[in-house]
Image (tube, rainbow, N blue to C red):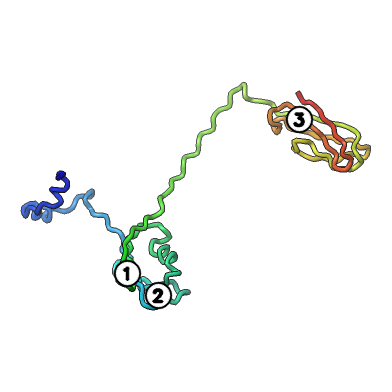
C-alpha cells in the first residue's frame, strides 16, 4: 500500500487536529470552493434550480427553467462561462449526476512583435512597368493577366496598363493583355 493511501485511511491524530484548529489557515491552504448549482427535474419537466442554496429563477422573459433552456441556465449560472461551477442534476426517476463546468480559459493578448529593420539590400525603389499594345476595339475592356488589373482601350484601340512590380509574383515574367470584346491578345515579357 502506498504512503498516500496509508495516510488517507489512517485515523487522525487528535493532537494534530487540535493544533490545526488553533492556528489560522495560511494563504496557500485556503480551500477552493466552487459554486454549487442543484437542478431538480419535476414531473412536469420544469427544473427547480438553486445556486449555493438560494433559488435561481429564470430571466423575466421565461416562465420556468426547462430541459430546453438548460444551456441558457448554465450560461446564466456561470456568468457566461466566466466562473467554474459544480452541478448536480436530480432526475424524476431518482438518478442523479454531478459535473464540473469549467470557466472559459482567459486569453491574454500576445504582445505585438517589434518590426524587424529592413536590410539595405532588401529596399527596392517601387516603380511602374508600362505594357502598351494596339489592335483592341475602341472602348473595350482589356484585362492584364494574371488578372492584376483591367483598363479600357482608347478611342484609337490602344490599351495601356501601369503595373507595380511589387504586385507581380516574381517582379518579372510575362504579362498578357486580353480584349474582352475583340479577343485580341498581346503578350509582353517583362524580364
Dot 2 falls on a residue whose secondary structure is: loop
Tell me which residue sits at (77%, 36%) in the image. Answer: 145
| Residue 25 on image: x %, y % | 18, 52
Residue found 80% across the figure and 33% down from its top: 176
Q: Residues within 10 Å of mark 3 (few under 14, many from 20)?
A: few
Crowding at mark 2 (Cα within 10 Å: few <14, some 14-19, many 20+)? some
Residue hosting label 1: 90
Q: Is residue 145 left or right of residue 170?
A: right
> Which labelled disc corresponds to residue 45?
2
Cα–Cα span, label 3 and label 1:
74 Å
Q: Earlier in the sequence, mark 3 or mark 2?
A: 2
Residue tagged 3: 128
- Identify the mark nearer the N-term, 2 or 1: 2
Residue depicted at 16% across the width and 48% down the height = 5
- Depth check, front residue: 159 or 10: 10
Q: Secondary structure at mark 3?
A: loop
How many neighbours does mark 1 have within 10 angstroms: few (below 14), some (14-19), or many (20 or more)? some
Residue that appears at 16% across and 53% down = 24
Kindly indicate the quadrant of the structure image that contains residue 150.
top right
The residue furthest top is: 121
Tell me where residue 172 appears, x and y as whole percent. Answer: 73, 26
Q: Quadrant of residue 123?
A: top right
> Alpha carbon of mark 3 to alpha carbon of mark 2: how far?
73 Å
Name the quarter where the C terminus is drawn: top right
Which of the two marks, 3 or 1, is nearer to us in this view? 1
Q: Nearer the viewer, mark 3 or mark 2?
A: 2
Q: Secondary structure at mark 1?
A: strand
Q: Residue furthest right?
A: 156
Amino acid at each position: 500500500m502506498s504512503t498516500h493511501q496509508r495516510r488517507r485511511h489512517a485515523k487522525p491524530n487528535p493532537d494534530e487536529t487540535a493544533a490545526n484548529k488553533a492556528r489560522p489557515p495560511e494563504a496557500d491552504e485556503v480551500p477552493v470552493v466552487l459554486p454549487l448549482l442543484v437542478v431538480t427535474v419535476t414531473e412536469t419537466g420544469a427544473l427547480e434550480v438553486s445556486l449555493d442554496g438560494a433559488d435561481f429563477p429564470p430571466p423575466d422573459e421565461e416562465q420556468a427553467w426547462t430541459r430546453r433552456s438548460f444551456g441558457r441556465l448554465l450560461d446564466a449560472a456561470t456568468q457566461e462561462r466566466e466562473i467554474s461551477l459544480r452541478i448536480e442534476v436530480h432526475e424524476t426517476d431518482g438518478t442523479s449526476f454531478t459535473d464540473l463546468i469549467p470557466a472559459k480559459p482567459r486569453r491574454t493578448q500576445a504582445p505585438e512583435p517589434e518590426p524587424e529593420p529592413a536590410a539595405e539590400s532588401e529596399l527596392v525603389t517601387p516603380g511602374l512597368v508600362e505594357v502598351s499594345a494596339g489592335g483592341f476595339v475602341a472602348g473595350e475592356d482589356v484585362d492584364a493577366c494574371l488578372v492584376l488589373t483591367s483598363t479600357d482601350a482608347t478611342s484609337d484601340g490602344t490599351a495601356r496598363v501601369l503595373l507595380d512590380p511589387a504586385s507581380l509574383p516574381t517582379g518579372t515574367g510575362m504579362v498578357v493583355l486580353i480584349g474582352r470584346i475583340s479577343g485580341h491578345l498581346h503578350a509582353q515579357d517583362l524580364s
